[in-house]
Amino acid sequence: MSFDQTDKTLLLLKPRGFCAGVVRAIDIVRIALEAFGAPIYVRKEIVHNRYVVDDLASKGAIFVDEIDEVPNGQRVIYSAHGVSPEVREASKKRGLRVIDATCPLVTKVHVEAIKFAKEGHSLVLIGHHDHDEVVGTLGEAPDVTYVISTPEEVQTLEIPDPNRVAYLTQTTLSLDETVHVIAALKQKFPNIKGPHAQDICYATENRQTAVKDVSAECDLLLVVGSDNSSNSNRLVEVARNLRTKSHLIENFKAIQSEWLEGVRTVGVTAGASAPEILVEQVVEFLTSKGYTNLKEVEVMPENVRFGLPPEIVAAIGSAPAAAQ
Ligand code: SF4
């Protein structure tokens, strides 16, 4: 079956791509490199995106997995996903000069974990066991925290005092699936406490809402993002749950020509750590394949910005060029 080329539509979802926490984290590394010079060490991927990490590495950032890989006395930046107190302690012991790029919305979850644990609650942390953010949050109260990700896991949870329990979540989960886990928790532990405002962040929610609003109009939805990006993977799941074909792509080169067979309307979005240049390349590629009817669909405005940490503000003050 062949379509008239002019019929092919590309829907570009908005909001998409970088969130305020990712912009801040990348700015911190960029400004630190300009103000202090290379090398600047960064613990873990600053954000979960290969392009961003390679770009900063080419400018002099050295990415390490653990603090013991950083030479004593050097500068180290913590990633947007946050760290556990154990990591902070290890940095102190090595005399490192720390710049913290933890997203303020991840810090909010850490503060809640500390508060609930101090009050004597057991904590149920809904999230993915091996994700950097969950590892960091778990580290705030490891002896009283239980990590789960599904309603089924709730059934097997054994909590010492079922009347003193609280839940928290990773910031980048699927809203729809987390609702079911929380409902199962409330059923099993009727007195369970939760955060004042949901832990799933505004950027995760907005990008999922945009996919929900637009996916019925798409034959295929492409999500630009890296394999290890939690919020990007969730966008693919949201589309698939609505029976829209969807794939996660690192960049335009990952698009397989058979995916486009019979596809009249393709939607494109990007996870919170994926840079716009990768989206532009996808648009260019799809345009070359006949998707020339380009429409940007703005589901909601998004204007969140976070301030920079004091060390970086001071660095900008002493080296104005760094802020350009
Ligand atoms: S996805 Fe949300 S929690 Fe994660 S860095 Fe962005 S704003 Fe912060």
Image (spheres, grey):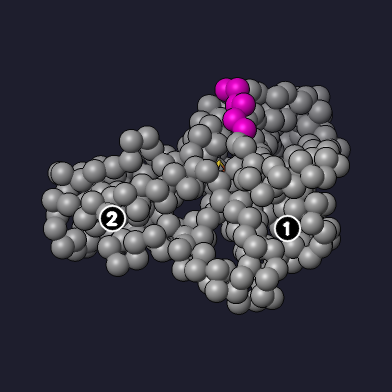
Badge 2 density bin: few <14, some 14–19, many ≥20, Cα 10 Å:
many
Q: Is residue 266 visible?
A: yes
Query: Residue at label 1?
Result: 53
| Amino acid at the residue labelled 1 | Val
Query: Residue at label 2?
Result: 117
Q: Earlier in the sequence, mark 2 or mark 1?
A: 1
Figure quadrant of residue 309: top right
As drawn, the residue found furthest toward the front would be 318
Q: Position of residue 81 (x, y in %)?
A: 54, 54
Q: Position of residue 244 (x, y in %)?
A: 55, 39
**Residue 301 colored in magenta in the image:** yes
SS assignment at label 1:
helix
Magenta region, main secondary structure: loop
SS assignment at label 2:
helix
Q: Position of residue 255 (x, y in %)?
A: 73, 50
**Residue 66 colored in magenta in the image:** no
Q: Quadrant of ligand 1?
A: top right
Q: Is residue 265 left or right of residue 131?
A: right
The span shown in magenta is: 300-305
The residue shown at (49%, 47%) is 106
In the depicted view, which residue is nearer to us: 70 or 305?
A: 70
Mark pair 2, 1: CA separation = 35 Å
| Amino acid at the residue labelled 2 | Ala
Mark 1 residue CB less than 8 A from any atom of ligand 1 = no
Figure quadrant of residue 162: bottom left
Q: Is residue 21 left or right of residue 60?
A: left
Marks 2,1: beta carbons within 8 A: no
Please state the total of marks drawn on the protein image.
2
In the depicted view, which residue is nearer to us: 147 or 222?
A: 147
